[in-house]
Image: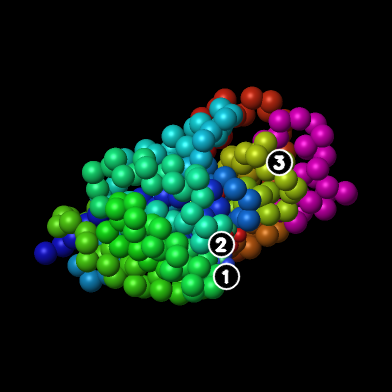
Amino acid sequence: MKKFGVVAIVGSPNAGKSTLLNNLVGVKISIVSPKVQTTRSTMKGICVKGDSQIVFMDTPGIFRPQKKLEKTIVKHAWSGAHNADVILLIIDSTKGITENDEMIIKSISKEEVPCYVALNKVDKIKKDKLFNMAEKLAEFNVFKEIFMISAQTGERVDVLTDILFDSMPEGEWQFSEDEMTDAPMKFIAQEFTREQIFLLLDKELPYNMAVETDKWEVDENGKTIIYQTIYVIKDSQKAIVLGKGGSMIKKIGMNSRKNIQKLLDGPVHLQLFIKIKENWVEIPDLCL
Ligand SMILES: Nc1nc2c(ncn2[C@@H]2O[C@H](COP(=O)(O)OP(=O)(O)OP(=O)(O)O)[C@@H](O)[C@H]2O)c(=O)[nH]1
Ligand SMILES: [Mg+2]
């Protein structure tokens, strides 16, 4: 009998949700950075084991939103959780169980689906601290199981997936066996460029930027030609994205192109443009 289910990966910003999704799928599809609020919308990763298929949903970090874009981001995260058969909470064990984590635990305890929790980044923390945290988590009486994993190294991720695959409800698969996501390549490619903005630009700057793929074509030699626009809010930001003599935009483009090439497994030409659009945060297609 076939099994199928959706697992929402939720948690505080920067907990390692996207890193885990990439590890589960085995291919980089979701962007990762040391900054909070890297993920702005949900990203599905599809995995198969035996008769079971799981759609893992990487969601944006949940926090108390202040600004308009933040409210949209958090709304997306919760809509991911509401549509799931199972909720998997990821906690950054190096930070301990924070107030924000507790706020999330209270909210997910109201959802009528099984909840699991994983203490992540165990490669960076002493075992005794982990056991204290696990005890604290058990006291909430919310979780069916508490895992200790490293999404980065893959340590004990198989323990978690074995249990999740077993716990899926019976049902027809909704994707073919070789599909890894339903996200269009166009979208993942623009996310890869946004990732470089997060990795290469300082502090608040990346939060004021969005990326959109304008054109995507394959030439006669099989090379994929991609045109993308980076939207910024003001002139001074445009200058920073350009960098001295265009050095920054060149670096962003080069790194992003490498990741897109890996994903497509073929040659890519990536052309980046910058546009000032004060109100891009108001445009749903751009802010997500
Ligand atoms: N040492 C270590 N670092 C990790 C691990 N998992 C994630 N990280 C790092 O933690 C940072 C955040 O990872 P992300 O996967 O982007 O976190 P996220 O939960 O998706 O963050 P948002 O999208 O902002 O909510 C990155 O610098 C990752 O490299 C881990 O298991 N061990
Ligand atoms: Mg993320």
Are discs 1 and 2 less than 8 Å apart at CB?
yes
Q: Residue furthest left?
A: 1
Q: Position of residue 38 (x, y in %)?
A: 57, 48
Q: Position of residue 125 (x, y in %)?
A: 55, 70
Mark 1 CB within 8 Å of ligand 1:
yes
- Display coloring: rainbow
Q: Secondary structure at mark 3?
A: loop
Mark 2 CB within 8 Å of ligand 1:
yes
Q: Position of residue 66 (x, y in %)?
A: 57, 30
* Segment tinted magenta in the rendering: 230-252
Question: Which amino acid type corresponds to the residue marked 1 in the rendered image?
Answer: Lys
* Residue that appears at 47% across and 67% down: 130
Q: Is residue 244 magenta?
A: yes
Residue 176 visible, this orientation: no
Tell me the quadrant of ligand 1: bottom right
Q: Residue furthest right?
A: 245
Tell me the crowding category of disc 1: few under 14, some 14 to 19, or many 20 or more residues within 10 angstroms, Cα based: few
